Every structure is written in C-alpha cells, then in structure tokens.
Amino acid sequence: MIGRSEEYAKMFELEGQLWWYRNLHERVVTALERQFGDRRDIQILDAGCGTGGMLDFLRRRGYTQLRGIDGSTDAVAFCNERGFSVTFLDLTTLASFEPAIQYDAIICNDVFCYFTESELPPLLLALARRLKSEGILVSNNNAFSVFEGQHDIAVGILRRFVLTDFEQLMPPTGLRIQRATYWSFVLSPMILLMRRWQRLQLRLGWQKPENAQSDVYLPSHWLNETLYRIVRTEQKFMSRTPFGSSLFMVVSSQHPSVK
C-alpha cells in the first residue's frame, strides 16, 4: 500500500473504530496472552505497522516494550502522531537491520501480500532470525483469491493466500505454524457477494481500476457494532473455521534459535 496516502489517512482515522480492525487487534492480544500470560514487558516488534493502530491498541492494553517498522513515510508520520518512534525500513532489507536484536513477539499483519514469490521466503527467514527461542510470529493475511475485488486494487495487494501456501513456505525458514484459522466465516457470504459485485462493475466498465476504493470505511454505528459482535462471537465459539477472507496464524520457531 506504499504510496497510497489517502488509504493511510483512512486507516489512521478508523483503526480504533472499524469492526474488522477491532477484532484483529483482539485476536493478536489473545495470541500474546496465550503464549506469555499476563506479562506486559515482552519485547514486541510490529513489522509493517502501518499507521500504528496495533501498537496503540497494545499500549492501551499495558504492553510497554513496543517497536515498529514500516516502508511508508506516510505510515511512519501517522505513527509519530500517535507518539510512537517507528523506523522507516523497506522490509526487503530486514535481514541487515539490527541483526543482533531479537523479540518475544513479532506482529506482521496484512503485509506478506505485498511481496513477490521471490521476496517472501527471505523476509520470512529474516523474521525467524528475529525471534527469541520461545517467541512467536503473529500474522494476519488476505485469504482466497475468490475474495479479490476493488479493495485489492485500491491498496495494491499482489496476492492472496491459503494455509497450504504457508505450510510450504515456513519449514525452510525454521518456522512452524502453531495455530491457524480463516475468519469472518459467518460474514464470508456477504463479503463474497460484495467483492463479486465489485469485480462485475470493473468487468463492465462501470468502475475504473484507477478509481477503485478500499473497504476501509465506517458504516453506521449499529451496523459496525453488529458486525463486530458477530465476528467476536465466531471467535469465541469457533476456534478454527475452514473459510474466510482472512487467514490468522500464530507461528513459532522449530528450533531453540534460528541462526
């Protein structure tokens, strides 16, 4: 999404309110608490932190050792507005960035979709080398190509994933998937219908690719709260679902340390 200033502005404005971000942030904290309990002093890196919404959520939950990196000057500027000291970094150069520093947890949400097939394995290896022996990588990803729509065009998504993609990518890097689930399962028919309508508009020329808009917008309060509660209930009673527009994973090192 680098270079799309208007999309970063929408993200900055809505991350704390929009149902989708709220659910994602809560999923991340649940994963951290499952691994580290009540500890709030763990070292956390948000790799591809965007406008800092995840970092802000973690700070409000009491986490104190927070670090962010992002390859967009717009994102870094918004993070600075939130009071975070975030480093500007092209993630393709992560291997040479502070190689001696390791983290208890690395968060990498909706980032891998911006990397080519040749760029992604080195990035995963660089992330693996930043994990402490008991550390975890928490990652959310765009899932299933059937959900492609104007949103993908608007934010520059290169690809979508299924779990088997990561099951093949992780082992050579020394990473192992602990838990994974697709989500927004209950809402997936609605999302799919919306995305198919978007694709039809593009195919018929009713909408131009250069004018494509992302799905980052705030619906009415009652609808936003209803969608939030639906997905929250899904998370509570369905720990793993077979389908959805996102794939959430908790990943750990296969070895005591990856060198």
Image (cartoon, rainbow, N blue to C red):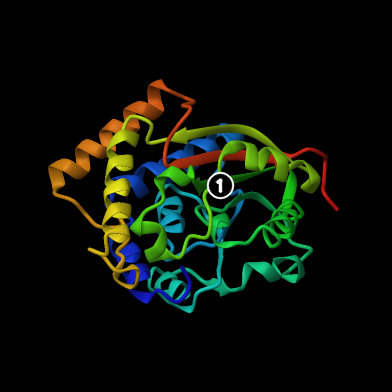
Q: Position of residue 8 (x, y in %)?
A: 37, 69
Dot 1 crowding, Cα within 10 Å, few <14, some 14–19, many 20+: many
Q: Position of residue 31 (x, y in %)?
A: 53, 37
42 left or right, relative to 198: right
Name which quarter of the figure residue 126 lies in.
bottom right
Which residue lies at the image location 45% right of the left edge and 51% below the top edge?
Answer: 58
Count of marks, rendered view: 1
Residue reaching furthest to the front:
204
**Toward the viewer: 176 or 107?**
176
Name which quarter of the figure residue 88 lies in.
bottom right
Which residue lies at the image location 34% right of the left edge and 63% below the top edge?
Answer: 11
Q: Position of residue 187 (x, y in %)?
A: 31, 34
Asked if residue 32 shows in the view, the reply is no
Is residue 131 depicted above or below 192 in this figure? below
65 left or right, relative to 12: right
Give the residue pinned by disc 1. 139
User: Label 1 sits on what residue type?
Assistant: Ser
Which element is circle 1 on?
strand
**Toward the viewer: 98 or 96?**
96
Which residue lies at the image location 22% right of the left edge and 54% below the top edge?
Answer: 218
Asked if residue 84 shows in the view, the reply is yes
Is residue 216 depicted above or below 185 in this figure? below
**Toward the viewer: 70 or 2?**
2
**Toward the viewer: 85 or 209?**
209
